[in-house]
Amino acid sequence: MPTLTIRDALNLAIKEELARDEKVFIMGEEVAEYDGAYKVTRGLLKEFGPKRVIDTPITELGFAGLGVGAAMAGLRPIVEFMTFNFSILATDQIINSAAKMLYMSGGQFNIPIVFRGPGGTALQVSSQHSQALESWYAYFPGVKVVMPSTAADAKGLLKSSIRDNDPVIFIEQERMYGLKGEVPEDPDFTIPLGVADVKREGTDCTIVARSLMVPLALEAAEKLQEQGVSCEVIDPRTIRPLDIDTIIESVKKTNRVVLAEESHPICGVNAEISHEIMERAFDYLDAPVKRVSGADVPMPYAKNLEQLAVPDVAKIIAAVREVAYLD
Amino acid sequence: MTKQSAAPPSRAGADEQSSTGVIDPPKEIDKKKLAQERDQAKERQKDRLGGLEQQQLIDLYRQMILIRRFEEKAAEVYVAGKIGGFCHLYIGQEAVAVGSISAIRKDDYVLGSYREHGQALAKGMSARSIMAELYGKATGCSKGKGGSMHMFDKEVNFLGGHAIVGGQIPLATGTAFASKYQGTDQVTLCFFGEAAVNQGAFHESLNMAQLWKLPCIYICENNQYGMGTSVDRAMSLRDIAQKACAYEIASEFVDGMDVLAIREATLRAVERGRKEQLPTLLEIRTYRFMGHSMSDPGKYRTRAEIEKYQERDPIKLLAASLIEEQITDEATLEKLDKEVREEVEDAVRFAEESPFPSPEELYTDVYANPIETGQSRTIR
């Protein structure tokens, strides 16, 4: 199996799907001639031409809405946001149009579209360019929200998202594009949406992590193992719909759980997961559910402040030790 | 002075100046002047009759009167508490939907705002399915899930009423994009009010439409009020047709009370769309005779202003033109009116007798590919 970066795995997924289905096209800022601001679309213009790989003006609301309209008329757009920070301008079309169209049309118009791009925290770009927005999108029925953490997941999940008949918000972590992993070559390799993955098995504590938190949780688990604590790391991969059964099953086994995320704690995805655990596995818990979240502040620029604002391995380890009553 | 690269908007067929200057609402009713203006409009319309067969003209009349009677009935059942929520009526603007949609094919796309009942009827949706939707019944065009502001019918490519001002404009640009992408010669008609012109969605869409040469016809129904705010109080440059110049898009200013003028202008835009795959902006000056919605007492307009436009009622205008030119007679038009009233009554009966959606419908149509994961979706 070849080893690819997440960037190249995503590129391959888009390439294979463009080749597979004429109705698929990709549009966004700098996706074509510039080869992508983060090079995810590198080489696609050359291979598929300007009809299928389209540079847009900086007009996020406009091209997001154009994509939704094109989907209503039978196409399968991939709309790239240079970063998800800019998707905020497009939320009217993502939420009011894409998410609700099928429902308010009484089942007549589904919207097979993927909104994708880098998101999450970045390094020293301050408040407007470094934030995790998945809880916003996951709030809305009608969309699916996907966040891969490995190269294989990135490829398999993106291909499933493109083939899915509903709007998918596909958030890549911009700090993870260079991360390498083995990726199956089969052009029909896909990973179903809505299925969590147990990234590491363990018996003493469950760590639920997504996106950038997954490699950090795995590193924490490795270190905790040395301290005699066996951690199970679960990556939901799809935030909406959330594979809660896999998480509950794990909690019933370990009786302790830490939830890690980059996003702000209030109204976050982990608040939701925590509720589900309380409702379904209350009697199995040996300690209160512990969250490790981004700080409840806009992202600062200064390096030392930024490090304080984002969860790291040490914070995850401390949380696990806390729920295990080790300190 | 920079070079003006697009031609100024055509004003052929418009009796009034576009809204470059201040719209001056009449303070007093000058009946003589109103009658004179009406007669001038009628003479202009008569000049356009020649382009159509008798039956086509009568069909246009029938569609306008159907929309009028449908909306009157919607108001009646709304007041009676049969339909809920918002209800934005199209009375006074019928010529815009009927004239423009008569210029396109069934497979062309139409998208509108929340004031879309008339466009839905003109596109060929049945009065039954629209009325049932207003009633929130399972037999409604959107299965009772959309209501007044979200009428859809895939069969006739009516792609919705959309209820965020200007939200349909990028969507329509997208259907036009899809037509070009797929190599069809379909065009898209996109209806919106003049207030939508102040939204970024309008400007972003027009820029993309001309940049990528998309066959979208943007129809600005300038009824001169965004809810209770007159265009004078909301728009710095009130000549909407002229805004197209900023994007090098062809545009026309059209009299919205003359169904034939609207049809002709749309035909020119359709030709441009089908043959050259170019967009057009039509500013169609119209007027809504009723309030913004059913809950609007309309205190921001003078009686004289409303009477001025009622004198120019597009339905009365066409009736007078047809009768005076002996294309039809009063008895025929009365018979049509009777037929239409029956059609609307039938729609009401159908809506009354139809069932509400079953409770299971609450959770259908959220996803085309639903995925069960065990996550709670209800409060237990």
Image (cartoon, coloured by chain):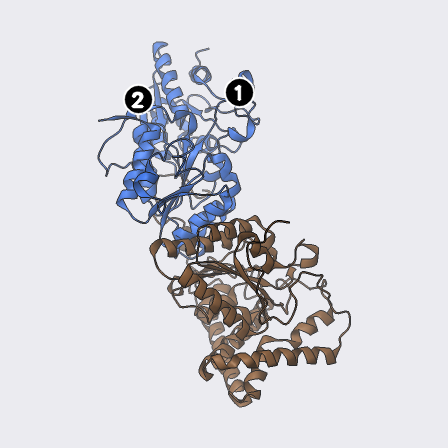
Chain colours: A blue, B brown
Q: What secondary structure is marked by label 2?
A: loop
> Is disc 1 in the same subunit as disc 2?
yes
Q: What secondary structure is marked by label 1?
A: helix
In-front residue for pair A210/A86: A86
- The residue beneath circle 2 is A201
State which quarter of the image contains the C terminus of chain B: top left
> Which residue appears at 55% of the width and 66% of the height?
B82
Q: Is residue B103 left or right of B196 when viewed as pictured?
A: left
Question: Quarter-wise, where is residue B233 in the image?
Answer: bottom right
Badge 1: few (under 14), some or many (20 or more) residues near its Cα, within 10 Å? many
Q: Chain of mark 1?
A: A
Q: Position of residue A84 (x, y in %)?
A: 47, 35
Question: Can residue B153 be seen by looking at this rendering?
Answer: no
Question: Can residue A257 be seen by looking at this rendering?
Answer: yes
Q: Position of residue A154 (x, y in %)?
A: 33, 32
Q: Earlier in the sequence, mark 1 or mark 2?
A: 2
Farthest right residue in view: B28
| Mark seen at residue B110 | none
- The residue beneath circle 1 is A306
Q: Position of residue B208 (x, y in %)?
A: 48, 50
> Which residue appears at 46% of the width and 10% of the height?
A327
Q: Amino acid at mark 2?
A: Glu
Please identify, in this view, whether the residue under mark 1 or under mark 2 is nearer the observer.
1
Task: Note whether B161 is above or below A176 in the view shown.
Answer: below
Q: Position of residue A177 (x, y in %)?
A: 38, 27
Task: Note whether B62 is above or below B10 in the view shown.
Answer: below
Q: Chain of mark 2?
A: A
In-front residue for pair A109/A244: A109
> Which residue appears at 45% of the width and 26% of the height?
A261
Badge 2: few (under 14), some or many (20 or more) residues near its Cα, within 10 Å? some
Q: CA distance from mark 1 to mark 2?
A: 31 Å
Task: Note whether B223 is above or below A56 in the view shown.
Answer: below
